[in-house]
Structure formats: structure tokens, C-alpha cells
Amino acid sequence: MLQRIWLHIGAEKTGTTTIQQSLKLSRNALADRGILFPRSVGDFNHTALAAYGMDDERGIEELRISSGLQDTSELAPFRERIREALADEVRSGEFHTMIFSNEHCSSRLKKPAEIARLRDLCLGLCQDVKVVLYIRSPAEFYASWYSTAIASGNTFDFPWPLPDHLKVAADWARMIRRWEAAFGAGSLVVRRMDRAKLINEDLLDDFYTTVGLPDIPYAVPERKNEALPLNALIFLRELNKVLPRIKDGRFNPDRANVVDVLRTWPEKERFQLNRAESQELEDMFEYSYETIRESYFPQDAALFSDGGRSTETSCRKRQLSLDDAVRMASFLWTSKASRN
């Protein structure tokens, strides 16, 4: 019988893939200790949780497509299958704890009813649910967010100044209030994706200790920098305009593994904001972040360390030369040929 569920909700761009891959690789070791990392909501990233929680009016978007849905009429049967499949997994062994992990829960579930729907799913399995949320400094978050946005098929330049609808993405205090309202005061465990603030300066040590498993011999996945090299990002942004990621309601097969190949482009520079832009973001969120510091980290003088401060150079208006574009196309073609 389950005694606790740990619901790891991200946030996005806080090392969630590393955590999820480690949980997947450690699945058997966890099961031996009575801890279930379920498969029915996703092999390692439990995207079906966010797809489950979103209101029907959100339609069939990317997460629901990845969950095998094609029409809103399938949502009610889909939710029923998820409930039954999770209950079956819990009954399949002598588990006392379950760990969920999906970063889209924090970014996609914004309405009280959506979070409550996910809460009720959890409470149907166990009455003790703890929500784990990692947060990150705004300059690092938005730089990483933009790389992911382009990798996901978007075509826009980095929006600056930030529009209001994007400001809320890193308003961690507002996010915390939403989840506390649904799960109750004291239900959230807030951690910081900041090397100086992590236990042993290591994300996995920090996560496993947070969920009460400081001594488990967890697996360490190969750690890759998922952020696109800067020139590869600019190239992909233009490519997305003529070769969209979603076509006719399906993932476009013509794109193949273009993003994975571009991530291997031999360049160290990544998209980043400059010092002035970073400072503007810090000033923007000063009140929000001070509220979190007072509530969760009163022993610290500041919520985040200064280690992530960017350089003087801004990448927002960088353009790709014709020569660079040709080299990138040649790199893609050669990589494709070598895989055939």
C-alpha cells in the first residue's frame, strides 16, 4: 500500500531530463526498495500526467499527440485508462512509495481545475503527496527556454522586452502559490537549480536526498548539454519556417533527427543574455523571489548565487552568415549520409 507519492513537476529547464533518465536507469534498484517509478504515464518523462490534467478545451496539442491522442472525444477514455494502469502498477508489487516526474505539469497546468485534476489522480492512489519543484535564476531559465522553444519548432526571435505572458513562466512565487492552493500548505518542497545551492553541488544527490533516498546507489546517465550551439540554434530557427515540426496534426517525419544532429555541431557558445539584460530580469522578479527566500530559505541572503551571471555580449540579434549556413547544411547532409 502506497504511503507517499513524490510528484516532481520541474520546473522546465532545471535538469529534469537528467533526473528522469536516472530514475529510469534506477527503476529496478528503486523497485527492490519498494519504490515505484511507473511506466504507464511515460517511460521516463511522465508526460501523460500533464496531458491528463489539462482542460479538454486545450484540444489536441503536442503533449496529447505524444500520448497517442487524436481527438478530444478520446480524453475521457484516456483518463480512465491512466487511472486503471497506475492502479495496476501499484498492485503489481509491494510498493510503499511512488515517484512521478514531468516538468510540463508546472508549465502547462495553470488553472486551479487543471492542477486539482492531477491532485485527485494522485489522491486516488495515496493520501500523502509531496510536490517537488526546482527553480532557477531568470537569466539562465530564459536562455535555456529559448533554445528549447527553437528545438520544438518555433521560429520567433527572442522576445525582448519580455511580454507579460512570458514573465509568468519564471514567476516562481506565483507558481508556488498555485500548487500550494491545490495540495495544501507544507506540501511543496522547493529546491534551487543552482550549483552552489545543491546538496554536494550535484543535482542528482540533491534530488534523491530530497525524496528521502540519500543512500540509494542511483544510476548516473550520460549528461548532455541539450542547449543548442548558438549558430545551430539560429540555423534551426530559419529551417523551422520551411520544415515545420508539426504537419497535418502529426510530427513531421521529414525532419527526422535534425535537432539531435544540430546539437552535435562543434561549437561551445550557447545563447545567453548579457549582464544588463540579466540584471533587468533580476529586478523584475525581485519581490517574487524575496517572498520565496523568506518562506523557504530564510538562512540565505539571496535566493540565487551570482554564478550564472552572463557576459557583456548579447546573443539576441546574432545573425547567421551565408558561409555559416552552407557549412551547417553540409554538416547536416554529411551526418544524414553517415546514418544511411
Image: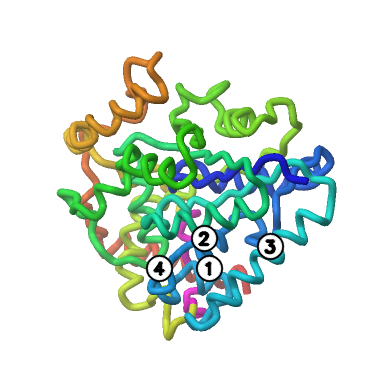
Tell me which corner region of the image, top left, top right, bottom left or bottom right, holds residue 329: bottom left
Q: Residues within 10 Å of mark 1 (few under 14, many from 20)?
A: few
To which residue does mark 2 refer? 260
User: Which color mode does the image show?
Assistant: rainbow
**Disc number for residue 40:** 3
Give the Cα separation between the discs numbered 1 and 2: 5 Å
Residue type beneath disc 3 = Ser
Q: Residues within 10 Å of mark 2 (few under 14, many from 20)?
A: few
Task: Tell whether position 106 is magenta.
Answer: no
Quick check: 77 left or right of 171? right
**Disc number for residue 257:** 1
Mark 3 / mark 1, whichever is N-terminal = 3
Q: Residue at x 26, y 59 (%)?
A: 320
Magenta stretch bounds: 251-264
Q: Find out whether the residues at labels 3 and 1 contact each other: C-beta distance under 8 Å.
A: no
Q: Report if residue 19 is visible in the image.
A: yes
Mark 2 / mark 3, whichever is N-terminal = 3
Q: Residue at x 60, y 68 (%)?
A: 338
Instruction: Tell me where residue 146 appears, x and y as whole percent.
Output: 33, 53
Instruction: Tell me where residue 212 appears, x and y as whole percent.
Output: 66, 30
Residue type beneath disc 1 = Asn
Along the line of sight, the residue nearer the viewer: 103 or 141: 103
Q: Find out whether the residues at labels 1 and 4 contact each other: C-beta distance under 8 Å.
A: no
Q: Nearer the viewer, mark 4 or mark 3?
A: 3
Q: Report if residue 232 is visible in the image.
A: no
Residue type beneath disc 2 = Asp
Q: Residues within 10 Å of mark 4 (few under 14, many from 20)?
A: some
Q: Nearer the viewer, mark 4 or mark 2?
A: 2
Q: Find out whether the residues at labels 4 and 2 contact each other: C-beta distance under 8 Å.
A: no
To which residue does mark 4 refer? 329
